[in-house]
Image (spheres, rainbow, N blue to C red):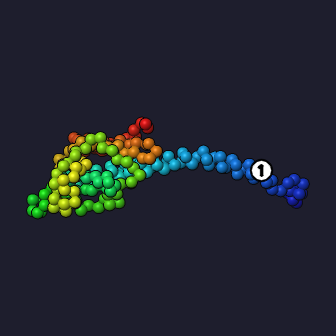
């Protein structure tokens, strides 16, 4: 009963002015937070792409050691893809490298919103001919090759998102260890 008397004596609700002030405050806070969240989303996408490449490199190294065959990761930056390939065996009637037949996470897709820049990787200018159906014949390829003894061609690349965040990805030639680190923003 006391509560009912108190409510009848005081006001019971919000005024239109109070509701408008709250809406304005929420709008201002949203305008301040959204740009920060967008950067966070872009950065998360970049880190995810970096971790995906680290996984592909680790898979290539592991396959090279266990099968005792050189494997390589070939980048097709035009189509935003990477491919895991193994050296063709002597009994196969092809030369060079052939698809490894190992499924990559999302079929080797690279996020098209992430730019990949090679600072150091092996450029291969070879006629792959029947090895890959001739589709790459004579083209300069970006590849990182992993060998059965655990070594790898040194490779270094930079992954960059649209906001300017950068990750450096380095493959150590003697150990095959892949290092992923954040680079200072330019």
Q: In this image, 175 relative to 161: left or right?
A: left
Residue 62 visible? The answer is no
Q: Residues within 10 Å of mark 1 (few under 14, many from 20)?
A: few
Image quadrant assignment for residue 111: bottom left
Q: Position of residue 59 (x, y in %)?
A: 27, 54
Q: In this image, 128 relative to 171: left or right?
A: left
Q: Indicate the secondary structure of the residue bearing disc 1.
A: helix
Q: Nearer the viewer, residue 106 or 122?
A: 122
Check the picture and name the quadrant holding the C terminus.
Answer: top left
Q: Position of residue 134 (x, y in %)?
A: 19, 60
Q: Nearer the viewer, residue 4 or 29?
A: 29
Number of numbered labels in the structure image: 1
Q: Position of residue 184 (x, y in %)?
A: 42, 36
Q: In this image, 156 relative to 24: left or right?
A: left
Image quadrant assignment for residue 118: top left
Image quadrant assignment for residue 83: bottom left
- Residue in the picture at 46% in, 45% down: 163
- Residue in the picture at 34% in, 55% down: 80
- Residue in the picture at 16% in, 54% down: 127
* Disc 1: which residue: 18
Check the picture and name the quadrant holding the N terminus.
Answer: bottom right
Residue closest to the far left? 91
Q: Position of residue 105 (x, y in %)?
A: 34, 59
Is 36 placed above or below 16 here?
above
- Residue in the picture at 70% in, 49% down: 24
Residue 108 visible? The answer is yes
């Amino acid at each position: 009963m006391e509560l009912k008397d108190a409510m009848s004596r005081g006001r019971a609700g919000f005024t239109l002015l109070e509701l408008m002030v709250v809406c304005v405050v929420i709008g201002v806070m949203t305008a301040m937070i959204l740009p920060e969240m967008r950067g966070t989303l872009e950065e998360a996408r970049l880190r995810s792409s970096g971790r995906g490449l680290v996984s592909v490199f680790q898979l290539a190294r592991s396959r090279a050691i266990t099968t005792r065959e050189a494997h390589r990761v070939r980048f097709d930056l035009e189509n935003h893809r990477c491919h895991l390939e193994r050296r063709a065996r002597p009994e196969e009637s092809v030369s060079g490298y052939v698809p490894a037949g190992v499924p990559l996470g999302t079929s080797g897709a690279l996020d098209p919103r992430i730019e990949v820049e090679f600072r150091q990787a092996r450029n291969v200018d070879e006629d792959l001919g029947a090895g890959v159906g001739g589709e790459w014949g004579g083209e300069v390829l970006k590849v990182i090759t992993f060998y059965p003894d655990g070594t790898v061609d040194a490779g270094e690349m930079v992954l960059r998102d649209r906001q300017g965040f950068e990750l450096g990805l380095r493959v150590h030639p003697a150990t095959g260890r892949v290092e992923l680190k954040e680079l200072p923003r330019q």
